[in-house]
Structure formats: C-alpha cells, structure tokens
Amino acid sequence: MTPPPRDPATAAAPDGTREQDPSGGPGESARSRPIIELRGVRKSFGDHEALRGVSVDVHDGEVLVLIGPSGSGKTTLIRTINAIETVQAGDIRIGDIQLSRTSADGKAVYCDQKTVRSVRRTVGMVFQKFNLFPHRTVLQNVTEAPMHVLGMPRGEAEAKAMALLRRVALADKAHSLPHELSGGQQQRVAIARALAMEPRAMLFDEVTSALDPELVDEVLLVMRQLAKSGTTMIVVTHEMQFARQVADRVIVMDQGVIIEEGTPEQIFTAPAQERTATFLRRVLHQDSEVS
C-alpha cells in the first residue's frame, strides 16, 4: 500500500505537539524512493496466514507506527524486514538490497546469507525483551557488535558507546551489569546497542509492553528524541498517545492485512473503517480505566 505524500520533516516536540524541523528535512528527491519496500508479502505459520499480501513503503526519516489488535500481524511484519521471519511470497527491498523476490512460481526467493546479514546490520531492531548479555557490562553490551561485526577498534567502539549511553541518559551505568538496572534502563541500553551499528532504520516491537507502567515514559522519551532527530522508525505499539503525537503515518492492521492508513489526525479523529474505530474505542477505554 503506497503511503500518502509526507510533510517535510515533522517531529514531536517535548510537549507532545508537532513542530517543523528548521532544517527542512530531506528534500523531495531523497523521499522519492522508499528506503524500505514490501510488496505482496505473505507469511504463514502452519495453517495460520499471519500476513496476507501486505504492501508497505517507508521513506527516509519517516516514523511509521503500526497499531491493531493482538495477533493482527504487526510483529510478524516488522520481523520480515530484517529476515528474522522469512516469507512464503512477496518482494522485500531494503535500500539497494533486494532481500526477497517473487519467482515465476509465486514463491519468495531470498538473497544469499551474506547479504541477509548485511541487511540486519542496516536495520536495527529493539525487541519486547531486552536480550542483553547478562554477564557483560552495559558498555560491553553496546560495544560487542561494532567490534566483532564491524571490526571497529575497541577505543573507537567504547567512545561511540559512551556517546550513545549519554544520549539515552545512562552514561553513569556503563560499568553496571544488566541485572543491576531497572527494566526501563535495560530497554534504553538495548536501544543504544541497536544504534551502535549505525542502522539506516530502526524497528521497535512493543518495546514498552514488558515494562512496569512507571518505566514506560523513560523509554518513550528516548524514542521521541530519536524521531525528532530524523531517525527512520517503524514502531509496533499499543501506546496510542505516542502514536498520535510522534507518527508521521499510522497503519492499522487486522487479521494479517492493512485495513487503513493515514496521518495520526485522520486515524484517531476520523477513521474510515469501523474496525479501526472499534479497536480505538476499546484501547482508549482501557487506557482511561488505567489512568
């Protein structure tokens, strides 16, 4: 599904309102071709078809938020972007790399494993669980991949890691072990670790769902700052306020298909589909009960 034209470089201000990036954002030529493109993607788990011919474009600097009921295919979709999940059919392009292509018999054919690994370096991912190395310090967790995958010298990797830890307000925890941190802190370390590979885009899969409610805001703050800085982001979330304030575009999924997409204003104030309206009423009602 082809996205509507984007306003140049809009982002969330600290108070949650939308503000214009004074730099003007990427030019029209930079946005003319998506940096991530999925066409007719199908993915099944046994008899269950999790994705049923999904097509999505993501442009440089765009914040795309995926919402919808549990089991609608959101997580499966973003996991196909870096080949954590392989698809049975469909074309997937990441930058200049054709990750999968539909063959004459209608089945997806993937590129070689070396190229798949290069895609995973290009697209960073932060999961629901933090997946930190428990026996390594925060600093070591962030430097591991740049040193061993990118071949970065230790001194350079550590300097870069410290800059990223400052960015997520955890420089003082550099020599702590993961179990000494709160869940929110561990998730912020996971974000810094993904950023250390200098990805072209970041994928976030329900990164606040495993956190205690009081720790959610500190992770969302880091994500807001990333969005404001122009980081390309695809976010699966049930945090509706975050989606409304930070997204450039919202996609609503249900039963393995995209049922609606548009600006946050369109989706949250005047959804075109009754299924979208029903989902939002239920989620927003639950949020009001919690608050």
Image (tube, rainbow, N blue to C red):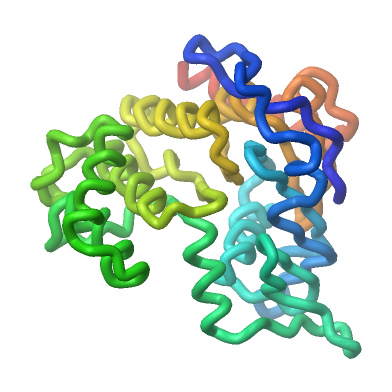
Which quarter of the figure has residue 252? top right
Which quarter of the figure has residue 197? bottom left
Q: Is residue 35 visible?
A: yes
Which residue sits furthest bottom? 105
Q: How many marks?
A: 0
Q: Is residue 61 left or right of residue 226?
A: right
Of residues 47 and 88, the one drawn nearer to the viewer in this rendering: 88
Residue 55 pos. (x, y %): 81, 57
Of residues 41 and 43, the one drawn nearer to the viewer in this rendering: 41
Residue 106 pos. (x, y %): 87, 83
Residue for point 80% across, 59% down:
54
Image vertical order of residue 255 relative to residue 7, above or below? below
Q: Is residue 285 visible?
A: no
Residue 113 pos. (x, y %): 54, 84
Q: Is residue 278 left or right of residue 152?
A: right
Image vertical order of residue 76 relative to residue 27, above or below? below
Of residues 49 and 176, the one drawn nearer to the viewer in this rendering: 176
Residue for point 27% across, 47% down:
160
Residue for point 74% across, 34% down:
27
Q: Is residue 264 left or right of residue 156?
A: right
Image vertical order of residue 55 relative to residue 19, above or below? below
Residue for point 61% across, 57% down:
78
Residue 82 pos. (x, y %): 57, 66
Which quarter of the figure has residue 174? top left
